[in-house]
Amino acid sequence: MYQSECAPKWIRGAVVAGYQWAITIGLLLASIVNNATKDRSNHSAWRIPIAIQFIWAFILSAGMLYLPESPRWLIKKGKDDAAARSLGRLTSLSPDDPEVETELNDIRAALAEEQKLGESSYADCFKFTHNKIFLRTLSGIFIQAWQQLTGINFIFYYGTTFFQNSGISNPFLISVATNIVNVFMTLPGMWGVEKFGRRALLLYGAAVMCVCEFLVAIIGVTISVQNQAGQKALIALVCIYIAAFASTWGPIAWVITGEIFPLNIRAKAMSLSVASNWLWNFAIGYATPYLVNSGAGNANLGVKVFFIWGSTCAGCLVFTYFCIPETKGLSLEQVDLLYQNSTPITSVQYRRELIAQDVHVADIKGDTYHHDEKVV
């Protein structure tokens, strides 16, 4: 949320995608440390990985002291001068620059409309309004759920055991390799989110992941663990699947949840979305051993679990097509106009109109802000 509110609109997608990139770097470092300590037979095998985490917590805590406050939060608190200074610093412009004042006016106009509704609560996140709050809240919750249901954390949480059970030698190194793919393929996603847009990449990523996961499942159930060519094909398909996730659904799910909520419910709706992410993260991590392991009380799916992940990726495709609009290049306030005057399917064309005509919330007076017709 902080990144979305502070980043200029022309690089907001890449900045927010950087959050996912940091996560992938953490996963890679964790896999390297775990690989380095796996042969230790004493308490240092688990103490070293935990101790190293304190380094990053210290760096984050120290860095927070130098970050400017969100201009939108400052406007909400009536601190207009501080908001101008903060926005000027974030955009490398003078606080008196006309572009800074234009964006501040948009924030004020959107906030004024939202304040007419009074203080927000979690119940307000599920209201049916002209602003499509209900759709936006559910979109944020479900895009985070679908991100987890792609099955990506099956690879990162359970990949070593899965590769070992599949007859692959040195599964720890394969796990490190998949994390390297995850890190480096997030970089094209950070570039592509501003080049090709959010919606297109989500659709493309879901389609590629769906195909790869069904192929992994089909190959896995038709070859033996001694089939070296088949094992190499499985590893290659898993890497392609990870590359598709890392460049699309990995970063862009966070970009979408950072962009689609209006200011008055942004914090609460974001908390619901992130809670959805971690709830499904926990549920999948907890259920995975029971799904794939053999023995009493387990489903013994093994590689057949990829039929499930392939099906959920098909669900990601359908969800994106009907529920996720294109928000590339829009300010957070213009996203409100996008939701009011278009549908996810028609959002691509309406976004072009907003940008071409340079429509701002502050320029729209009276009932026009609430109107259901296009603002052109």
Image: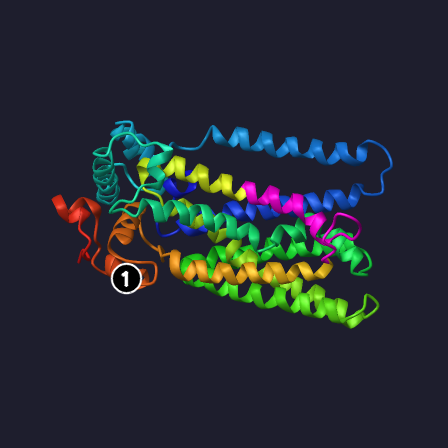
In the picture provided, is 310 more to the left or to the right than 367?
A: right
Please state which amino acid type lies under the numbered disc 1: Arg
In the picture provided, is 145 more to the left or to the right than 227?
A: left
Assign the C terminus to one quadrant of the image. bottom left
Q: Considering the numbered disc 1 on the image, is that residue within a helix, a strand or a loop?
A: helix
Q: Which residues are magenta?
A: 278-301
The residue labelled by disc 1 is 352
Residue farthest toward the left in the current orientation of the protein: 366
Taking the spot 53% from the left edge, 56% from the top edge, the residue there is: 187
In the picture provided, is 162 more to the left or to the right than 154?
A: right
- Most frequent secondary structure within the magenta stretch: helix
Residue 122 place in picture, x, y as percent: 38, 34
Taking the spot 45% from the left edge, 39% from the top edge, the residue there is: 272
Instruction: Return the residue nearer the eye: 158 or 357.
Output: 158
Residue farthest toward the right in the current orientation of the protein: 41
Q: Is residue 184 magenta?
A: no
Q: Quadrant of residue 333?
A: top left
Q: Is residue 340 above or below residue 213?
A: above
Assign the N terminus to one quadrant of the image. top left
Residue 169 place in picture, x, y as percent: 82, 59
Q: Is residue 280 magenta?
A: yes
Question: How many other residues sit within 10 Å of disc 1, few (<14), some (14-19) or many (≥20)?
Answer: some
Taking the spot 74% from the left edge, 71% from the top edge, the residue there is: 222
Residue 79 place in picture, x, y as percent: 27, 27
What's the coloring here? rainbow
Q: Quadrant of residue 73?
A: top left
Residue 12 place in picture, x, y as percent: 40, 49
